[in-house]
Image (cartoon, coloured by chain):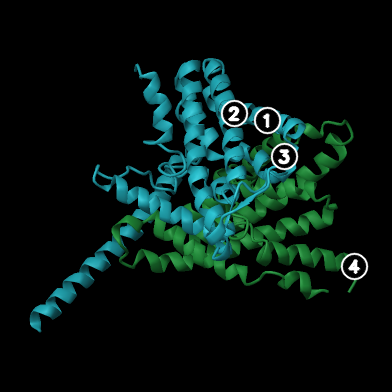
């Protein structure tokens, strides 16, 4: 297998399984807890996040590489990235509303919530920190996005069961949800080392 | 409305603790509470950003137009985060490396944006500074409490991560041998956080319970960004679901009673 493809697949699978942003790195917990009550909402949020993550990486990577690095403004990274992501989310919303109303109807609700999703800024920064090239960055973003979607969908299933179970009063609501999340996260620990050894 | 200065400060620490009561800033709370040192330094960094951004936003509260206030707040917050980041990199590099990406992720920490939105834009600079300090301290205290449990029982040590300053981690004699490593990992974070909130619920139960906002849309500082209908739709859907669940439960209980009576 060519070296390039190997790298791409490794970062993709690592994002989905071993370094799952939600369950292994505890990033993007707000939407994970807030929008996972129903399967459909969870899936919608997950797809919207994948979409924004890919767009964000496609925009922030060139900006960092060709603008900030060129003019030695790398310390402005955080400010520029968050502004780009905020603008991008608005932009995507407007475009979807105008051209693909059906998709907007199903995703539109979740788009504004994504600005403050730390997974999006997190992956943009990780791509820069680990000095990935453009293709690898895109692959990593897709992996992290898919990992987010997977976590959301799995947890929506778990949660619909919890909601119907009588639990002791103090743990009802948020605490029991977090404890369930802990068990789902434990399951993901089982993937440790799988991806690294897959192509070795 | 005139508020007592002391009550503004104390509110953030206990009654409106941002992590344990308002359930904001969960991501960094879970991620950096693996050791006491990282928890406290994250708390201090967030407190500095909170005070700075609260004061500036409060000073600019009559200048910033309402319709574009969120982007403006984000710029102010990002500026302070960058400043804190640079200061830490210059003077406390080991800590900077320890916190890593979480330092720049303070930008998207709901607590900072939430306080700007809920408090600083309606209050005077001094009050806002106190509010920022209180909320920051509340964040630090909550992180420290989680880190104490996670580091002591997860790693069996205290004060790890200060090796660069010549302070060695102290191994706690007995606990080190029976430590539970999973507590220091992500699942342990979820578990400890869940248990802590449950304990808070139990403690405050007698006082009428915590009035915690639902952690879907109401608790989110960017909730107003969504069109109001869509947001209420989500909450409605959620409440519908829980109502339905309760009805099912009640029906089940009624059934059980009937069965018992018949027997």
Task: Mark 3: give few (<14), some (14-19) or many (20+) Cα within 10 Å.
Answer: few
* Residue A181 percent across, percent down from the top left: 49, 62
Q: Are marks 2 and 1 on the same chain?
A: yes
Instruction: Find chain A in the image and tell me its colour.
Output: green
Q: Secondary structure at mark 3?
A: helix
Q: Which residue is mark 3?
A: B165
Give the quarter of the image for residue A148.
bottom right
Question: The chain coloured cyan carries which letter?
Answer: B
Q: CA distance from mark 4 to mark 1?
A: 40 Å
Circle number at residue B201: none
Q: Which residue is mark 4?
A: A3
Q: Label 1 near label 4: C-beta < 8 Å?
A: no
Instruction: Name the residue nearer the viewer: B71 or A102.
Output: B71
Assess whether mark 3 and mark 1 are in contact (beta carbons under 8 angstroms): no
Q: Which of pointers 2 and 3 lies earlier in the amino acid sequence?
A: 2
Which residue is label 2 attached to? B48
- Seen in the image, is B247 located left or right of residue B188? left
């Amino acid at each position: 297998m060519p070296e390039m493809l190997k790298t791409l697949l490794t970062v993709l699978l690592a994002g989905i399984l071993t370094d799952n942003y939600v369950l292994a790195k505890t990033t993007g917990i707000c939407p994970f807890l807030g929008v996972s009550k129903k399967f459909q909402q969870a899936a919608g949020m997950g797809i919207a996040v994948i979409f924004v993550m890919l767009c964000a990486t496609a925009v922030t990577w060139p900006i960092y590489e060709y603008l900030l690095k060129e003019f030695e403004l790398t310390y402005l990274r955080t400010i520029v990235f968050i502004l780009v992501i905020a603008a991008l989310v608005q932009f995507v919303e407007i475009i979807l509303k105008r051209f693909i109303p059906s998709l907007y109807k199903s995703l539109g609700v979740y788009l504004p919530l994504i600005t403050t999703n730390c997974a999006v800024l997190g992956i943009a920064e990780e791509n820069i920190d680990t000095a990935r090239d453009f293709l690898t960055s895109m692959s990593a973003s897709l992996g992290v996005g898919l990992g987010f979607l997977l976590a959301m969908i799995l947890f929506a299933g778990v949660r619909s069961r919890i909601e119907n179970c009588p639990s002791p009063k103090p743990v009802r609501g948020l605490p029991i949800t977090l404890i369930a999340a802990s068990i789902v996260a434990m399951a993901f620990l089982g993937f440790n080392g799988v991806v690294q050894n897959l192509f070795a | 409305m005139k508020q007592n200065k002391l009550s503004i400060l104390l509110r953030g620490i206990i009654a409106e603790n941002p992590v344990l009561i308002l359930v904001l800033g969960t991501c960094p709370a879970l991620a950096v509470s693996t050791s006491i040192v990282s928890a406290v330094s994250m708390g201090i960094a967030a407190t500095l950003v909170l005070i700075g951004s609260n004061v500036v936003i409060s000073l600019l509260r009559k200048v910033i137009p309402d319709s574009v206030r969120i982007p403006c707040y984000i710029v102010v917050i990002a500026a302070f985060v960058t400043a804190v980041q640079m200061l830490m990199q210059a003077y406390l590099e080991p800590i900077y490396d320890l916190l890593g990406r979480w330092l720049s992720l303070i930008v998207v920490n709901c607590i900072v944006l939430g306080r700007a939105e809920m408090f600083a834009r309606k209050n005077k600079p001094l009050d806002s500074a106190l509010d920022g300090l209180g909320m920051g301290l509340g964040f630090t205290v909550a992180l420290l409490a989680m880190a104490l449990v996670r580091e002591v029982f997860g790693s069996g040590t205290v004060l790890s991560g200060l090796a660069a300053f010549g302070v060695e981690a102290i191994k706690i004699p007995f606990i080190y041998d029976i430590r539970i490593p999973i507590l220091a990992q992500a699942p342990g974070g979820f578990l400890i956080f869940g248990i802590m909130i449950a304990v808070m619920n139990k403690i405050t139960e007698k006082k009428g319970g915590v009035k915690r906002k639902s952690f879907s849309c109401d608790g989110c500082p960017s909730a107003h960004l969504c069109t109001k209908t869509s947001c209420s739709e989500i909450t409605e859907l959620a409440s519908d679901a829980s109502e339905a669940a309760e009805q099912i439960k009640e029906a089940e209980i009624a059934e059980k009673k009937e069965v018992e009576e018949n027997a």
